[in-house]
Image: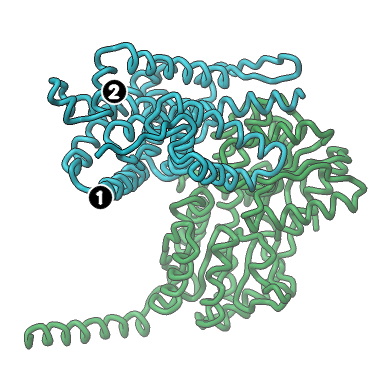
Chain colours: A cyan, B green
Amino acid sequence: MTQFLQQIVNGLSLGSIYALIALGYTMVYGIIKLINFAHGDMYMLGAYFGFIAITILKLDFLPSLVITMTATAIIGIMIERIAYRPLRHSTRVVALITAIGVSFLLQNSVAKIMGVSIKGFPMDTLPTQTWHIFGIVITLKQLIILVTAVVLMVLLTVIVQKTKVGRAMRAVAVDADAARLMGINVDNIISLTFAIGSALAAAAGILVGVYYNSIDPLMGIAPGLKAFVAAVFGGIGIIPGAMIGGFTIGITEVLISGYWSSMFKDAIVYGLLIFVLLVKPSGLLGKNRKEKV
Amino acid sequence: MKKLLVVLASLVVVLSSLTACTSTGSKTIKIGVNLELSGDYLIYGTPEKWGIQLAVNEINAAGGILGKQIELVIYDNKSNATEAYNNALKLATEDEVVAILGAATSGLTVAQQPVASQYKVAIVTPSGSNALVTVAEDASVFDWMFRTCFIDPFQGVVLANFASTEIGATKAAVLGATGSDYAVALNEIFTTQFTANGGTVVASESYTDDQTDFSAVLTTLMATDAEVLYVPAYADTAGLIIKQARELGWNVPIVGPDGFDSASLLTTAGAANLNNVFFSTHYTALDENPAVAEFITNYKALAKEEPMALSALGYDAMYLVANAITAANSTDTTKVRDAILATSNFTGVTGSITFDAKHNPVKSAVVIELVEGVYAKATRVNP
């Protein structure tokens, strides 16, 4: 039982990361129907900005987190302006291929500037406090990951549900043209969505950097794909769906590695995606909407 | 069109005169270097390059060999098997080198093997420790392949014996990737020897190549009563595993192979987590041999960093080839290859080298204990 609970704790920290990345995927898809494959690389960028803030600028964790999220948000806006906006009215496959191109651009630029070797954060970035509760080991870092993730998710939900900007975002997601007729600046709302999505991925990046202490230019590929699975699993375009999807995949992976074999975890996760798509194509929380003619 | 033809024709003339120039009037002896200077295994290729460079600087400063200076032709194989093969092909056919040094890892060395036998040029890997680098699956020896390090089976036996006798463990847990030749070979040999010593491998888990989270498997392994954890992995992954094991509060001795011997183990695991960690390697700076002290001083002056085992192996590999060329008194690749094979009691900074029938050096290993991330104690284990 202790072992099971320990695995759940392990799964929650892994799941928080997937959930944070999945939120960005889902928000961007919800608003412009673009599967932004460069999103995993925004997470990688976040890890590197965090690395620079902590090791070169010698800042503490919290200011580094804020700087990292801001810097990555700005890059997110720039990418949308330069790469996606001119293609907004072209076919979806064109935008998708552009996203893959942006992904390679980011990976190789970081590899060129920062080098390809693995970099580690200083060990004293966060105190190495550990608690033993009924035989379960919980580290301060795990707690910080979980708390940061939950706080950011709550904040996001409040922004989307309770503010004027959030209402504008929801309006654009439903019908961009109608929203424009109502006086909403659609371009600005889309930029904002990219900014928020990128900032959340950046938060995940710096958290992973501090937790695992190992970052490299290709670190975004696998978690990016897993987060995409999480977003689809929960119902792409639906914010609570991304959170549920992220945690489900994190915990599933850990339980399979712990009780069966690590070699099967990816196969099962992707298998789960296929299963969900077969049974409920719109995802766990997705509604089957009829196409209006 | 006529103009283009003239240009092309003159180009051909110029080029052919150039090649003629290099093959007949060469004043240097060319040695090829084919190493991982970027990509995943950059941390292994780079120190070997510095070791080789140091040896060449010393040899050339002392007047070179056969009255000629050594010229290195260095190619980066980008940690990729296809690149490694293409580089070897280029070194053998275009650059016409006397011998090739590299690669640092077993897989990439094996990838070059066809070039060695087809173009008859000896390849010496400083650190490719998989048994299949010098012998084929059917146990026939590759005539042109050599190495300057001990092989994984020997390393696996050393580690299993160390776990049984020095640590006194009877129950071991193993965590190794199934997608890596290095890990699979080391895993099998350790398990066999540890069992032969009267111990039991109580749990064996694996992981995928791109995995960074090991908390789940470590939690499972922790629940067993293993007294030692064996991790046949390279430093980047091993560092993550050690860190996460210690953070979960699992403090058993962790034992690993020469892949641990890299500065990146300290970066990823952190000094505080590197206690009670042991690994086997080829060389130790704790050695009291004066040649080792001199090597360390000169290496630091050249590379601006501490030498690692791989630096020392690169250095020894270069001297081994230089000695063979001197002994052969020729730059003919076949004579050089025969001279390499005939090497007997060559003394390098990593120990003494004599080749056995399978082109493997018979030499000792060193087991190093880490205390707070520092190489605290070295135990030499003879074959």
| Closer to the camera in the image, B301 or A239 | A239
Viewer-side residue, A178 vs A196: A178
Chain on which label 2 sits: A
Alpha carbon of mark 1 to alpha carbon of mark 2: how far?
A: 25 Å
Check the picture and name the quadrant holding the C terminus of chain B. Answer: bottom right
- Location of residue B202 by image quarter: top right
Give the foreground label among 1 and 2.
Answer: 2
Residue B15 sits in quarter:
bottom left
Percent of width and height locating residue B213? 59, 35
Residue B38: image location, x then y, percent:
43, 52
- Kind of residue at badge 2: Arg
Q: Residue at x 62, y 80 (%)?
A: B338
Mark 1 or mark 2, earlier in chain: 1
Is residue B304 visible in the rendered image? The answer is: no
x 51%, y 59%: residue:
B52
> Which of the pair A194/B192 is nearer the observer?
A194
Q: Residues within 10 Å of mark 1 (few under 14, many from 20)?
A: few
Identify the residue under disc 1. A94
Q: Is residue B95 above or below residue A228?
A: below
Numbered badge on residue A170: 2
